[in-house]
Amino acid sequence: MICINGNKMTEETDYKHYKLGLALSGGGAKGFAHIGAFKLLEECNLKPDIIAGTSAGALMGALFADGYTADEIKELFTGREFSEFAQIQLPKAGLFDSNRFRYFLRRHLRAKTFEELRIPLVVIATDLDHGESHEFKSGPLVEAITASCSVPIIFSPVMIGGVHYVDGGLFRNFPVSVIRKDCKTVIGVNVSPQMPQKYKQTIFYIAERSYHYLFHANTLKDREMCDVLIETKKFGSFSMFDLQNVGQIVNIGYEAAIRAFELVVQNNNKEAIIETIRSGGNQKLLP
């Protein structure tokens, strides 16, 4: 389902630090759909003033905030295998360690710290020791992103400052609320819609489905906070670890973003979003 929430399109009198915020959900390989949304933003000449991301959203958001184009991000992942990002280990704290993922980040991220990014970024992880959501906004990037992407049991927790962190989706898989109060307009991309799937007796399937239900439950309020919500059931056709269909997932994200923007125009919402789109100069989405 693709939804536009008009209730947030009312005139706001409070000062906002940012004109346009972008919130990106977790969802494993389904997060490649974020690249499709980036592509449309580029075509509209729209640049977010701040990005908040969880798990896959943190990874994609970091690359976009680092100055990579949508096509460049797509190229980084096309033709890759899961084994290039994770190495199986004797189960201790997780089935896989994340050293290969860290190597990928160190190799490709130009910025080494949050402060060096071209766009401010908030990365959401879960503080496993204290049982609470945590926002990383400063300091080294690699460990924060790795922590946000570390699905419990599948990957080992990441220790930062003496605290163990895991996937941010446990408490906040769709971090709209993190930036809502500071942004005049928020575009959200939720790549983890609720979708039934045929049961498979594998540890990956059981883990994925269990976390999917948990992540979905904590996205409901954040969905309502978006000015534009990009979401489609087609995202549910792919698994968390699917690296074989990067291009297809990107295209579905792009198509969903176009439909969401077109709905804004059709609904004649003439406040923040329309003003932002018009200033971007993309005429094909305008009436």
Image (cartoon, rainbow, N blue to C red):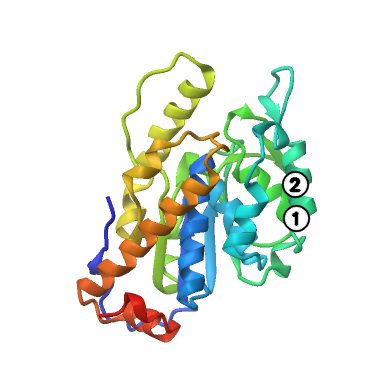
Name which residue lies at 59% across and 36% down.
Answer: 128
Contact flag, marks 2 and 1 (Cβ < 8 Å) = yes
Give the residue type at disc 2. Answer: Phe
Name which residue lies at 55% across and 34% down.
Answer: 241
Q: In this view, does 96 lie to the left or right of 130?
A: right
Between the C-alphas of marks 2 and 1, the distance is 6 Å
Name which residue lies at 54% across and 69% down.
Answer: 50
In this view, the residue in front, 243 or 132, is 243
- Where's residue 216, x and y in %? 37, 40
- Could you say whether the residue bearing mark 1 is in a helix, strand or loop? helix
Total count of labels: 2
Numbered badge on residue 160 = none
Give the residue type at disc 1. Answer: His
- Quadrant assignment for the C terminus: bottom left
Residue that label 1 marks: 108
Q: In this view, does 127 lie to the left or right of 270?
A: right
> Dot 2, how many residues are within 10 Å of its Cα: few (below 14), some (14-19), or many (20+)?
some
Instruction: Report if residue 226 is visible in the image.
Output: no
- Could you say whether the residue bearing mark 2 is in a helix, strand or loop? helix
Q: Is residue 101 above or below residue 95?
A: below
Q: Is residue 194 above or below residue 258?
A: above
Q: Is residue 12 above or below residue 93?
A: below
Residue that label 2 marks: 104
Name which residue lies at 35% across and 52% down.
Answer: 231
Q: In this view, does 94 lie to the left or right of 251?
A: right
